Image (cartoon, rainbow, N blue to C red):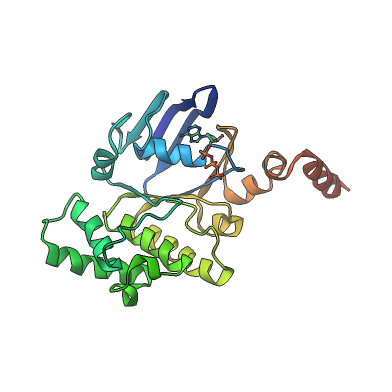
Amino acid sequence: MTALLETQGLGRRFGGLQAVSDVSFGVPAGQVLGVIGPNGAGKSTFINLVTGHIKPSSGKVLIGGKDMTGAKPWAIAHAGVARTFQIVKPFRGMTVRENVAVGVLYGPSHSGRMASALERADQVLEEVGIVHLGGRAPGELSVADARRLEFAKALALDPKLLLLDEVMAGLRPSEIEPSLELILGLKERGLTVIVVEHVMKAILAVSDQVMVLHQGQILTSGDPRTVLSDPRVIEAYLGKRYADRREGRANA
Ligand SMILES: Nc1ncnc2c1ncn2[C@@H]1O[C@H](COP(=O)(O)OP(=O)(O)OP(=O)(O)O)[C@@H](O)[C@H]1O
């Protein structure tokens, strides 16, 4: 099966720092990939490389088998890739509904008519559960609802591949559950999703496979339960002493 997204030897240097190094990975269409790793591991840089927000220093990005290495963000969006940002960035002078409609207008298959864009915006807002807030200003939204708006803006582009950069950060457990259901619903209707997240419960609940980045490189990847119980992964997150103690207990 052709991967919807494939990276080959992808790398990015910032001066003397190798933020992402030699990442070769494929995500089959319709799968959810969880990307985890400690702070500074290179997760956001990986997303930025895939979406064209930064250019790679080495390697390739293929989308649907097509080489999109170094393409501009709008060209990658037109190839069917949408993303959320860690720091939410709504257009402040517009309502929630208008914010999403702008995304619809930028989508590859839209007619360009505002009335139908607003109609589609309402459908997307309904899907993420905040259609009742469509007339509000983005600044009035709670943290959880602002993240839903960010989600909606990405979905408005009608993507094949959706990259979610820590959409659950700072949410309460009761607010996380609807986000998980939303991601699983998107998967059900065939979307391919990459979820960058520190919330392990969320990673376990939605991922078909997990890739662990550490110091810019793939530490390991595979089935979520196996990966999350790998002593190297625990060590990368919590330090060697903790991993050794845990290993000792498991072998006792
Ligand atoms: N534009 C930049 N210029 C210089 N260094 C950068 C830049 N962007 C990221 N870095 C560095 O690259 C490394 C990887 O950062 P990145 O933000 O990709 O990590 P991350 O895994 O997303 O971390 P977090 O979980 O904290 O969001 C870090 O050391 C970071 O300081």
Pinpoint residue 209: horizontal percent, then vertical percent: 52, 47
Q: Nearer the viewer, residue 16 or 24?
A: 16
In which quadrant of the rendered image does the N terminus lie?
top left
- Residue occupying image coordinates x 54% and y 26%: 17
The residue at the far right in this view is 252
Q: On the picture, is 35 further left or further right than 82?
A: right
Pinpoint residue 191: horizontal percent, then vertical percent: 35, 54
- Residue occupying image coordinates x 43% and y 37%: 26
The residue at the far bottom in this view is 132
Compared with residue 102, is residue 50 higher up or lower down, i.e. above or below?
Answer: above
- Residue occupying image coordinates x 46% and y 27%: 12
Q: On the picture, is 131 further left or further right than 238?
A: left
Pinpoint residue 88: horizontal percent, then vertical percent: 41, 55
Numbered-mark total: 0
The residue at the far front in this view is 93
Q: Is residue 204 visible?
A: yes
Q: Is residue 1 visible?
A: no
- Residue occupying image coordinates x 22% and y 57%: 102
Q: On the picture, is 138 further left or further right than 93?
A: right
Pinpoint residue 75: horizontal percent, then vertical percent: 24, 39
